[in-house]
Amino acid sequence: MNDITELTPLSGMFHPPEKFVDHAAISGMAAYRALCASAEQDYEKFWGRLALEHLQWETPFSQVLDESDAPFYRWFQDGRLNVSWNCLDRHVHQGNGDKTAIVFEADDGQTASVTYRQLQRTVCRFANALKSLGVGKGDRVVIYMSMSIEGVAAMQACARIGAIHSVVFGGFSAKSLQERIIDAGAKAVITADEQVRGGKILPLKAIVDQALALGGCERVEHVIVHRRTGNDVGFDAARDLWLDTRLAQQSDDCEPEWVEAEHPLFILYTSGSTGTPKGVQHSSGGFLLWATLTMKWTFDIKPDDIFWCTADIGWVTGHSYIAYGPLSAGATQIVFEGVPTYPDAGRFWQMIEKHRATIFYTAPTAIRSLIKAADSNPAVHPDRYDLGSLRLLGSVGEPINPEAWLWYYRHVGRTSCPIVDTFWQTETGGHMISPMPGATAMVPGSCTLPLPGIMIGVVDETGRDLPDGEGGILVVKRPWPSMIRTIWGDPQRFRKSYFPDELGGKLYLAGDGAIRDADNGYFTITGRIDDVLNVSGHRMGTMEIESALVAHPLVAEAAVVGKPDATTGESICAFVVLKQERPGGEDALRIAGQLRNWVAQEIGPIAKPKELRFGDNLPKTRSGKIMRRLLRVLARGEEITQDVSTLENPAILEQLKEVR
């Protein structure tokens, strides 16, 4: 009997357990609707009240929202606060200085922990070190580090002195790093000698040296190096300095720089883009407010929770739900250096058991890869571990297909943990659509309903509202505090990309397709707008086809893209990873035929992939995200010229050229 038969109730919905509802921050749908109604009745009063309740201000704001220069919206702009003070000092002052802030587990399993007081002192020393090097308010600092307490401290130290950080994922190439250093105009770079992932020692400082040697980075005055491995690395005595040596010279006290709410907190460059990097600029007050509120609402954070977000600080999830949200909420969190499959694919489950994690937030790609591992090796199946500490699960990064949702619900959550399937983006700063775990009935594959205060719509290409049940373009109709403020140094690109004239210039274009259920109002993300396929005049979301493929008992993972077709305008190309060995010859043709017929049965003949390509894996970044832009290039039969330095498995590209 499969998971769907066993677990899906007649209604197709999964209701949160009563014991969860009883103690939830948003308890029941009546409470959720009351919050939504409050926002609709007086939008500015709603946000102003929340900002005063959940953040501490050195100077309170007198105006909540300034829309006079739309779409360059300003929130709480005459208020002054400090993000680091809100994340650290206020908890120490409230008597929680001895509470554990971070439990760090290294790649090899060694652990370390810091309390809020210890982290505050480290951040103060770090901030003083930056100040001693001439870094101050408004200066940009690029951080190129792996997951570590020091990485979080570096971000917090920048926030403490009003410097603007730009974290670059530690898997990016020297060229990608150089482009970001130049675009941000960085004054300093913070890195480590090396990083350790999956039992391998990988360079960091050497890549920084290569990036700076490419030219154009003359504004960089200092490179601050954390000793992770202690191995010898190149060292320029006039420019480079060791972090531990510099910290030892600093005071534990650093008065925070009180900044305007609109002061930029960070720039984060969107991954996978072609051409000039796109620096998403976020503010201090609005971003921190939403990171804090979503910890309370979406994750229902409690004082005794052990929170674990498996993301990397190089991505927005690691900003909102590692570096800032959990600390602002005063939570204890796990920070993990390694990968889910080292030393084996039971690593996540072993860590949940070891640290007694209560909230677990990871990506669908990771879940699907662990399903495959568990099916092939019972020793790493989550059923073999004590996961009884868990009370809430989350999914982030892309829509989660129903089969993976059900496996996650049954085998990790043991049918007692709500799953928050969160839709949001780098540009939104935090969750936009997600179940509220103590209120919303869950439907596998749907991110369900917008958070209170988030005004979501589905429109056509002209900005006209579409009726429920009809797929279209996802938009946000009203500004919200944590939204992108601009693209760093390119306000026209910001306006054109996110508030296009075709939609009237006032609707935020998410870039995703969506459909809202006519019966329950739930939203389902159908894929990026450029991932909506048009085959013989029929519009289909790639996610729908991928979900159908993954529902087949042979399939572990699938990704679907479109390619030009002389007859149908566009045809469907599917890249598939099986739960068994990659097939070849007649076996591959036979399985490809089975899968085509399966998709035709699940969706309709029009959805049958014209091409299927089998691989041992899919091309993914080291954070686990499928690089769909590369799949589009492969589908078109073109040579890959884009940067593939962030690929976990570049050799897979050759396999995926073979058509079945």
Image (spheres, rainbow, N blue to C red):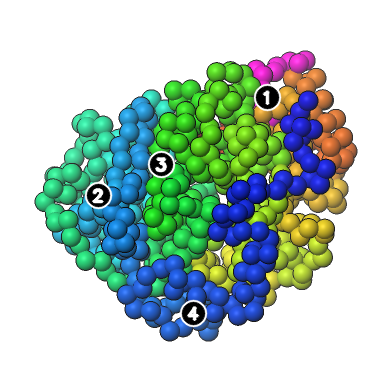
Is residue 337 shown left or right of residue 192?
Answer: right
Locate residue 453 relative to residue 104 in the image: left or right: right
Residue pointed to by mark 2: 118
Identify the disc placed on residue 64: 4
Query: Is there CB contact under 8 Å for labels 2 and 4?
Result: no
Could you tell which of marks 4 and 1 lies nearer the N-terminus? 4
Please identify, in this view, whether the residue under mark 2 or under mark 1 is nearer the observer. Answer: 2
Q: Secondary structure at mark 2?
A: helix
Q: How far apart are the alpha carbons under marks 4 and 1?
A: 52 Å
Binning the other alpha carbons within 10 Å of mark 2 as few (below 14), some (14 to 19) or many (20 upward) gives some
Whole-number angstrom distance, CA of label 4 to CA of label 3: 34 Å
**Residues drawn in magenta:** 574-587
Kind of residue sitting beneath label 4: Val
Q: Secondary structure at mark 4?
A: loop
Residue picked out by circle 3: 334
Q: Are marks 4 and 1 in contact (CB under 8 Å)?
A: no
Q: Earlier along the polypeptide chain: callout 4 or callout 3?
A: 4
Q: What label does residue 508 carry, if any? A: none
- Frontmost residue, 536 versus 202: 202
